[in-house]
Amino acid sequence: MQEPLHIASRRKRAGRRSSARSKIRFLLHENAPSFSLHLLQALSFFFLSLSECFELPSPFAVCAIGAFIFSKKSLLWPCVGLIGSLTLRLMWQVEPDIWQYIGCGMLLFLSLRPPRSITAVSAAVTAALSLRIFALIFSPSTQKELVLCLVSLLVGALCTPAFCHVALLTQRRLARMGMDDLLCCLVLCAVLLSGAGRVVIGSVNIGFVIAGFSILLCAAVGGSTAAVCAGLVSGLSLAICGHADGYVVCFAFSGIVSGLLYGHKRLLLCFVYLLCSAFTSYAVHFQFDFAYLSSSLTAVCAFYLIPRRYLAHAFTLTRRLSPDATDNENAYAQHMRAQWAGNLQLLSQMLPEVRPPETNVQERLDDLMERLCAGCDLRPICWNEQAQDTAQSMCNYFIGSDRSAVLDTCQRKQAWPALALDYERSDQQALLRNAYANREREATRTHLHAIAQAMTQLSFESLKCDRDDDHLFGEAAYLLRQMHIAGRIVYALRVSQHITIALRYEPPITRQKQIDRYLSELSSRLNRPLRISQRSKDLILIEEAPPITVECFHLSASSGDGSSENGDSILLRTGRGGIELGMLSDGMGHGAQAHEESEKTLELLSLCLDSGYSVENALKAINCIMLSATDGEQYATVDLCVSDLWLEHATLYKLGACPSILISGGSMRTLQSSALPLGILPEIEASTHTFAVADGDMLIQFSDGLTDALGGLHALEGQISLLARDKLQKSPETICTALMSAAMRRCGGVPPDDMTILCTRFKSSKK
C-alpha cells in the first residue's frame, strides 16, 4: 500500500534535518579543539594587558607578543584579545595605558622577519617598553612614575625569556616537564591570574573564580600537595595585583582540606570547598566576604560541570609536573629489555638439537650395487639368488669395517678396499660436519644466554638506581661550571648505593690537571672517595672508590736468546662496580704466533666480560670461537682473577694454567687446576677458587716457563716463602724482580721457555 503524501514529505524533511545536524556535529567535533585554543590565546592576551604588579605599568602583553613572534605563531587571536581589552577599557572609562598597546603594535613589524634568538627578542621588547620612558621624559611627570616605568622595563626584559620558553614548550609534547619548564609556566599563570583579578562581573571576581577552579582541579587530580601549591600561587598572584593578603591564607587552607578528599566524588569535594571558603573568609576578615563566596560558588559550579575526560587530561598533566612521576620512555625501555631478555633466554633453550649422522643400510647397499656391480655378468645371481649372502657380506665389509668379509665369488673384489676407503672418508666428513654444527649451536646458545643474562642484570641494576638523585647531579654539574671545565655530566646516580658519574669533556680544551682537581674537589664535597674507573677519548667514568684497591706488577722473558716474541700475554683491566681483572695466557709453543694466539684470547675474553657476559659464558664463547677457527689444533691457557673490591673477595678461574700462590695472613696457599686449556674440547669447565681478600694479601700468577726454570713448583714455593718472610720484599715489584732474577740465574740467562709472572697485591684504600 502506498503511504500518504504528507507522511512521505515529513520523513524527507526529518532526514534533511538529521543530515544537517550531523554535518554541524562533525564541524564542531573537527573545529572545536582549534577554536578553543584560539579563544584561550585571545583570553590570555586580554588578561595579560590588564595585569598589574605593585602599581607597575603592565609590560606582560608586550613580552607575550615578542614570545609569539619568536615561536612563529599566528598573531590574529592575540590581536583580538588586545583589541577587546582596549575596547573594554574605553567603555568602562578606565585608563587605557595606550603606550602598552603602542609597544605591542611596534613589535608586530618583527613578524615580517622573526628574531632567531631569545636575546634579540628581549632587546626588541626592551626597545618597545622604552617608548613609555621617552614619553615621560618629554612630558610633565613625577619621579615615582619614572621609577615605576624603569622597573617595569626591567621586569619585562626578565620575563621575556620565560614567556619564550613557554611558547616553545607548547609546540612539543614532553613525557615529563623539568623544573625550568615548571617555573616558566608558574610565572605565566601568576601573571594571567593577576590580570584576571582586575575583572569583576557583578559581584563575581574572575580571578577568584579561576583560582578556586584551579584549586579544585589540583585537589581532584593531585591531592593536598598540588592543591596547596595552587592556593599559594593564586593567593600571591592576587595579592600582587592589589587584593588583600589574607586571601593567601584562604586559598591555601581550602587547598589543604580539599586535597584530603583526593579520589572522592566531585560533589563532596565541592561541598567541602564551599565550607572552607566560608570559614576562612570569616576567620580572616571577621565577616562574610560575599564577593569571595559568590566567586567560590561560581568556581564550584564550573568545576562540577566540566566533563570527566578533561579531568583525565588534567591528571596526566599533573603527573608530568610531579617529581616522582614515572618516565614513560624509561618504563618502556625496561619493559622491552625484560621481554627481549626472556625471549633470548627461551630461544637459547629451544635451539634444535643437531642429529648425529646415521647410515641408512638400504641406501648404502643400493649405492654399492650401482657403483660396484654395474655391468657385471653375475649381478642377477648375486642380487637375486644369493641376495642375502651378498648383502650380509657387504654390510660387514663396508659398514661394519670387517675387512675379512670379502665375497669370494665377486669378480670385482679388488675394488672393495678403494671403495671402502671412499666411504670412510665420507663418513668422517659427515662426523666433522656434525661436530662443527654442534660447536656452532653451542656457540649460538652461549651467546644468546649470555646476552639475556647481561640484559637481565642491566634491568636489575637499573631498578636499584636512584634516578631522582638531583643533589648528586646538581653538585657534579655545578662544580663543573664553577671550575670552567668544557664538558657536561651525562649521568650522575647511585648504582647499588655506590656513586657513578659519566663526564663528557672536550679533549683539546680540558687538561688532565683540571680533571684531577675536579675529581679531588668533588670527592671532598660529596665526602666520598672517587676514582676514574674507565677513560675513553672524550668520556671518563667516575666511581666511588671501594674499600680495597689493587697494585699489580708483571715481568716477562722470552725463550732462547730473547730475539723471538714472548708467547705469553698479560691483560689488566678495571671494570665497572669495583671489578678488577688480572688475566694471563700462555699460547701453544713460543714466538709471534703463540703471542698472537694468547693475546687474541685475552682480548676476546675482556670484550665479552665488558659486554656483560658472565665469566662462565665468556669462557665458553671463546672456546667455541677457538674451536671453529683452529679445529682443535691450537690452544691457549687462561689464568683469570676476578676481584670484587666492594665485596672484598676474588675468584680465580683456571684452564690449563699453572698453579697460583696466594699469600694471606702470613700463610701461603697453592691454587691448582685440573682443567684443559681453551680450544681443545667442545665442553669446558674451569677450575675455580674463591677466597676473601684483605689488606696485605697477595696473589702470584705465572706461566710454566718460570716453574721449569726454577726447578719445579716446590722450588718456586720455597723461593716465595723466603721472600714472604722478609717484610721489605712484600711489594709486587720486588717479588717479581726477585723471582725472575732467580730463574734467569738458574738457567744461565737463557730461558728454556717463555717466562711470565704477575703479582697482585690487595691494599686498603683507607690508608
Image (tube, rainbow, N blue to C red):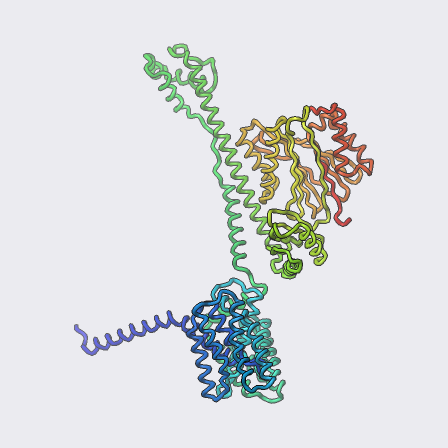
Which quadrant: the N terminus? bottom left
Looking at the rendering, which quadrant does residue 685 occupy? top right
Residue 449 against residue 46 in the figure, above or below: above
Looking at the rendering, which quadrant does residue 557 occupy? top right
Residue 383 horizontal side relative to residue 183, left or right: left
Q: Position of residue 713 (x, y in %)?
A: 74, 28
Q: Position of residue 607 (x, y in %)?
A: 59, 41
Residue 136 horizontal side relative to residue 749, left or right: left
Which residue, as the protein is rendered here, is positioned at the far front?
138
Q: What residue lies at 51% left-to-right and 50% top-to-bottom?
A: 339
Viewer can see residue 576: yes
Viewer can see residue 279: no
Q: What residue lies at 33% left-to-right and 73% top-to-bottom?
A: 24
Q: Position of residue 692 (x, y in %)?
A: 73, 43
- The answer to which of 292 and 157 lies nearer the viewer is 157
- The answer to which of 197 and 450 lies nearer the viewer is 197
Residue 332 against residue 453 in the figure, above or below: below
- The answer to which of 760 and 223 lies nearer the viewer is 760
Residue 746 horizontal side relative to residue 677, left or right: right
Which residue, as the protein is rendered here, is positioned at the far left?
1
Tally of numbered discs: 0
Q: Position of residue 728 (x, y in %)?
A: 82, 38
Residue 229 against residue 381 in the figure, above or below: below
